[in-house]
Image (cartoon, rainbow, N blue to C red):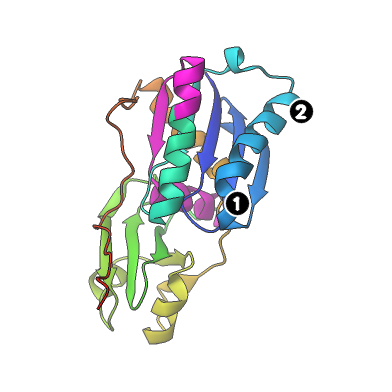
Amino acid sequence: MALILSIDTATTTGSVSLARDGKALQTLVNEQQQDHAAAMVLYVQQVLREQGVTAADLDAVAVSAGPGSYTGLRVGVATAKGLCYAWNKPLLAVSTLQMMAQGAKDAVQDDHAWYCPMLDARRQEVFTAIYDASLQPVMEPQALILEPGSLDAWLSQQKIYFFGNGSPKWAAMLPSIDNAVFVSHEMSAAHMAPLAEQLFLQKSFVDLAYFSPFYLKGFYFPQKP
């Protein structure tokens, strides 16, 4: 059982959440991506203060490890690493896609379906994966260029909930299929709570010196003409 501080800045919405024994106690959300670097530290201070908790009380810090925005992921990981170094706490790395699947499953409460988060990766590409009801990957995380029929093999097997800011692109090219269900989803570090708790109990900590975000694909920097 653990008291864990979680930080997510993988997308335009950033958040900080404090959880005990896998259940969120308080969460603060920032919807201005350009402010993540400053807001996250202030939110950490606010959450700890309002919950009557000190850094010494924490068992670990968890961070949404990607995929997602390159800049956003760097901000979150740098913040989490800095806190771990300063407080001498272990770091837990939680998959952003699995975190999203946890949130969607909590919302729809369907144990007989699969969950497919989709993060917009520009043009017709998304960062995605498919998880079963126990949040184990059925389709491993990947950068997928969407086209009609991309996920037919999976949809023929099971009902799948699609969500995330990349899912509208998929909805636009997908004919009406009973097994495809689109649901709204809000990013939140609170959804990391049960996943971070599980990692903590397994002692699945990452190396502070060498850990880097899970980008899924290399950064493309266009050359000037």
Query: Which residue is painted at 46% across and 44% down in the image?
Result: 75
* 86 w.r.t. 125: above or below: above
The one of 199 and 68 positioned closer to us in this rendering: 68
The numbered disc on residue 35 is: 1
Q: Main secondary structure of the magenta part?
A: helix
Between 159 and 217, the one nearer to me in the picture = 217
Crowding near the residue tagged with mark 1, few <14, some 14–19, many ≥20 C-alpha atoms within 10 Å: few
Residues at marks 2 and 1 touching, judged by CB atoms closer than 8 Å = no
Q: Residue 145 at what x, y percent from top left?
A: 26, 73
Percent across and percent down for residue 207 are 30, 25
The residue singled out by tag 2 in the image is 50
Q: Is residue 147 magenta?
A: no
Residue found at x 73% / y 25%: 49
Q: CA distance from mark 2 to mark 1?
A: 22 Å
Q: Do we see residue 133 in this rendering?
A: no
Whether 99 is among the magenta residues is yes
Chain part drawn in magenta = 82-108
